[in-house]
Amino acid sequence: MSIFAPARTVLIAMCLVTSGAMAFTLADISNADAASGLKAALEKGSVAAVGKLGIANGFLNNEQVRIKLPPILEQARPLLQMTGRGQQLDELVVAMNHAAEAAVPMAKPLLLNAVKSMSVTDAKQILTGGDTSVTNFFRNKTSAELAMKFLPIVKGVTDRSDLSGKYNSVMGQVSRLGLSQQLSVEEYVTQRALDGLFKVIGDEEKAIRSDPLGSGSKIIGKVFSAVR
């Protein structure tokens, strides 16, 4: 028997004791800690999302959130290309995505303020609601206000780039094909920008839940490890 065996046995026992001491269940987590963990996760997710999307080509170069043409224009694309509108459609896509990236930075303060509306006693329930329950909570709390904030920013970009004019020009031709579109370009881009924002925040939440200790935050690690 190796002379190192006893030492190794003691080391293993110490690790087991330590891991047991560090393990938490949801019952061990106070409501205050749960709320703090949620706040930290939101801050981490929102900062990451804004950092990824609110930059040049943040939407355009991300296939998961890239804003495509409205379905009605995609449907009419073959006919529009036949009439020489193909390049205009491509320009619309680029302009819409640039408009979205300009609006996204406005989301950060609103997302961080939303945590104040969360009841501390609701924290554990939100935590156990699923892989994106935190994201869904804040989406429900902030979507309407974010849309109001995004819309004028998007409109400012579309006005400067004459996106509205280009869009309406194409839509005019589409309407002559017997198709119709209800949303303005600003409303459409705003909706897709919000969808993209919360998609990325949701991805960040999933990453935190899959590896809480790798989040770099002690409170996130403690709280989210307890609900795995």
Image (cartoon, rainbow, N blue to C red):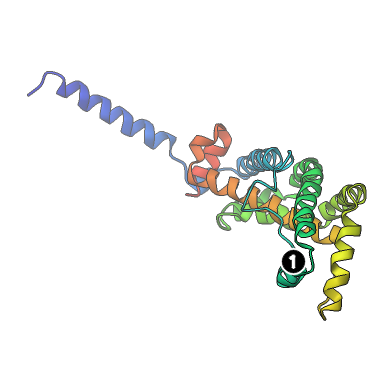
Q: Classify 34 as above or below 9.
A: below
Q: Classify 84 as above or below 52.
A: below
Q: Residue 191: where, in percent of width, then height?
A: 78, 59
Work out which quarter of the rendered image holds the N terminus and state it.
top left
Q: Residue 100: where, in percent of width, then height?
A: 78, 49
Residue at 65% over, 42% down = 45
Residue at 87% over, 50% down = 149
Along the viewing direction, whichever of 94 and 87 lies nearer the viewer: 87
Q: Quadrant of residue 189?
A: bottom right
Amino acid type, mark 1: Gln
Residue at 89% over, 58% down = 164
Q: Residue 217: where, in percent of width, then height?
A: 57, 32
Question: Left or right: where does residue 45 sit relative to residue 108?
Answer: left
Residue at the extreme bottom of the image, as rendered: 178
Q: Which residue is mark 1?
A: 81
Q: Quadrant of residue 51?
A: top right
Residue at the extreme left of the image, as rendered: 1
Q: Classify 195 as above or below 73.
A: above
Along the viewing direction, whichever of 88 and 196 lies nearer the viewer: 88
Along the viewing direction, whichever of 8 and 191 lies nearer the viewer: 191
